Image (spheres, rainbow, N blue to C red):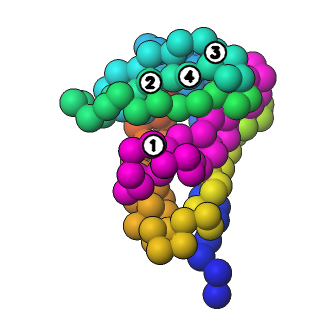
């Protein structure tokens, strides 16, 4: 059986898409739930975001899609690969308005290109998204 290439998570948030968008695409928002600090060089396809987890970083995210307040996507380096390895996974956030707030879908793809490293990188990101998305919900609820 082939190794999974995709992580997908859906999250129902009690906040409007614009507020969720700001949590995903501003330094203050992103640095509050996704790591401990963030810098956004240029919020456009081809731009970069740098994030830190405590003293670990910076980690660079390469922006692919910016469609406010609906879609945001980036690629990033894969944990466990040597520095400079060109392989990356792609993370896409889709925001859909609901009657109670926003349905956020997060999809990360690209693990199949890894072969032997897939299990470690994939499982690490599965656990990571569970933690990070819980922190996103807490951040949004606290800022309400």
The residue carrying mark 2 is 50
Task: Identify the residue at image location x=46%, y=55%.
Answer: 125
Circle 1 or circle 3, nearest the eye: 1
Q: Secondary structure at mark 2?
A: strand
Circle 2 or circle 1, nearest the eye: 1
Circle 4 or circle 3, nearest the eye: 4
Task: Identify the residue at image location x=63%, y=15%.
Answer: 43
The residue carrying mark 1 is 84
Q: Secondary structure at mark 4?
A: strand
Question: Dot 1, crowdedness within 10 Å: few (<14), some or many (≥20)?
Answer: few
Q: Is residue 31 above or below residue 115?
A: above
Q: Is residue 27 magenta?
A: no
**CA distance for labels 4 and 2:** 7 Å
Q: Secondary structure at mark 1?
A: loop
Q: Position of residue 102 (x, y in %)?
A: 69, 33
Q: Is residue 11 above or below residue 70?
A: below
Contact, mark 2 vs mark 1 (Cβ under 8 Å): no
Left or right of 18 in this view: 129: left
Task: Identify the residue at image location x=26%, y=35%.
Answer: 56
* Most foreground residue, 18 or 75: 75
Nearer-N-terminus badge (2/3): 3
Contact, mark 4 vs mark 2 (Cβ under 8 Å): yes
Nearer-N-terminus badge (1/3): 3
Task: Identify the residue at image location x=38%, y=52%.
Answer: 82
Magenta region: 66-93
The residue carrying mark 3 is 43
Whether residue 144 is visible, yes or no, is no
**CA distance for labels 2 and 1:** 16 Å
Nearer-N-terminus badge (4/1): 4
The residue carrying mark 4 is 48
Q: Position of residue 129 (x, y in %)?
A: 47, 49
């Amino acid at each position: 059986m082939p190794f999974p290439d995709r992580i997908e998570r859906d999250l129902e948030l009690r906040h409007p898409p614009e507020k969720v968008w700001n949590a995903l695409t501003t330094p203050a928002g992103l640095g509050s739930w996704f790591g401990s600090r963030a810098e956004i060089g240029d919020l456009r396809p081809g731009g970069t975001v740098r994030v830190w987890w405590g003293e670990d970083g910076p980690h660079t995210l390469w922006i692919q899609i910016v469609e406010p307040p609906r879609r945001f996507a980036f690629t990033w380096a894969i944990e466990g690969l040597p520095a400079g390895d060109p392989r990356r996974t792609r993370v896409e956030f889709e925001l859909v308005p609901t009657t109670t707030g926003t349905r956020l879908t997060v999809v990360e793809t690209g693990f199949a290109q890894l072969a032997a490293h897939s299990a470690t990188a994939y499982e690490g990101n599965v656990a990571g998204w569970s933690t990070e998305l819980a922190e996103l919900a807490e951040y949004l609820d606290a800022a309400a």
